[in-house]
Image: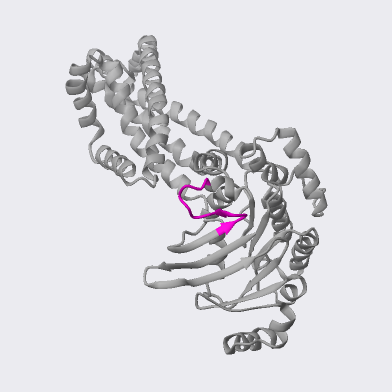
Amino acid sequence: MIQIKQVSKSFGHVNVLKDIHLEVPESHIYALIGPSGAGKSTLIRSINALESIQAGEILVDGISVHDSKTDINKVRSNIGFVFQSFNLYPHLTAVENVAIAPIQVKKVAKEEAEEKAKKLLTSLGLGDKFASYPGQLSGGQQQRVAIARALAMDPKVMLFDEPTSALDPEMIKEVLDAIRHLASTGMTMVVVTHEMGFAREICNQIVFMADGRIVEVAPPEQFFTNPQTDRAKDFLSKVLNH
Amino acid sequence: MGSWRVIPEHMPILLDGLWMTLQISACALLVSIPVGIILGLCRISRNRFVSFIAVCYVEFVRGVPLLVLLFWIYFVLGKILKMGPFLSGVVGLGLFSAAFIAEIVRAGIQAVPRGQMEAARSSGMTYFQAMRFIILPQAFRKVVPPMASQFITLIKDSSLVSVISVVDLTLIAKNVVATSFRAMEVWTFVAIMYFCVTFFLSQLINVIERRYRVSE
């Protein structure tokens, strides 16, 4: 579903992505983990072209994302993206936040889009927050609205960029539960996360990045019990023993 | 102390002047808002040429005194395009104010967090859809206060059109003083008239601002 081929990127003299190869098959869930500055966010943001790349190619559902001939808006409407800082639209209600892209991009009728938005919000436990503005919601609620907003476009792929990093500890579970539920529906997902237990539980593969490279790709059991590289061992010893 | 009689005696003509001031200010406003918004959008355009043109305009107009700009438009541009004093005044005030509105619009748009544009674009919206439905409505709320003070400045600046023989409140007042020799009374009253208009406007804008804040 997602093919990343020999992708490189640099900001000035700093190489943030170095020759990245990765394939995410349909209905698989991949976690991107690693120390900060490893290039995880840059990589996930380049999958829907929020970041440009300087070399290589990224295909989503067979379409080359960074090709200038590609209609990027069309590609993006098939990719749900959830941000660390939610980025909900503060001037719109929860329902409007979820419905606006289907209305404007897919030209769905307003009533239909809002009906669907309400269903999505209800399924995420936000049945009583339809008319709330983002400023009136907790962080966990805002992030669930953001997930509903991404799902409203019926994406083929969902990308999560540290979806729980900006949340208070007691709100992390409600967001992870929403992602777990999504996982059970067979959605293809890539998740940048620092929640190791969560990554171990729901992901098919752990992708460990450091210094702009993919250092190790392995199923979670193998990665967490028997990492092959020193870099991964070092990282795990720091994040698991505290 | 009977000197204040000069005011009621000249009330009709002073009100005519006030009406002209309001008309020329309103027309200049109608010119400056669309021009200012377009310039502000050009200013942040990713197209270097477009933003360069907007920067040049803003810098040039802000760097020239309004009085000189009005003279230039009336005596140079006005002669070529056959514009009378009123039209020259509207164009001069409008283009002058547009430069300031452009800066307000630019600042308002740039005050909207980057993540808003990213969220909108990542859901498949075009740049223009994202601007129209996500960025500009938020920027609008942020620009209401500075925009309001710009409108008030515009009304006050409109007194300068009296020098290109637009018969506004200031020119009428000057004429009344010339014939009645009651400078203190007339200029005091005219100052109060300007103040009443701008005070009313700022109160009106306060109401609008409060309404938008509630709905947020």
What span is colored magenta in the figure? Answer: A59-71
> From the image, which quarter does the N terminus of chain A lie in?
bottom right
**In the image shown, does B174 or B182 lie closer to the viewer?**
B174
Looking at this rendering, what residue extends furthest in the front direction? A62
Residue B101 rendering spot, x and y as whole percentages: 39, 37
- The question of residue A197 being in magenta is answered with no
The answer to whether B193 is drawn above or below residue A94 in the figure is above
**B75 shown above or below A212:** above
Q: Is residue B10 above or below residue A11?
A: above
Q: Is residue B210 visible?
A: yes
Query: Main SS of the magenta segment?
Result: loop
Of A15 and B27, the residue lying toward us = A15
The residue at 40%/14% (across/down) is B15
Which residue sits at x=17%, y=21%?
B75
Residue B38: x, y in percent?
A: 40, 35
User: Residue B216's x, y, as percent?
Assistant: 64, 44
Residue visible at 46% across and 36% down in the picture? B148
Identify the colour scheme used.
one colour
Residue toward you, A4 or B5: A4
**Residue A69 falls inside the magenta stretch:** yes
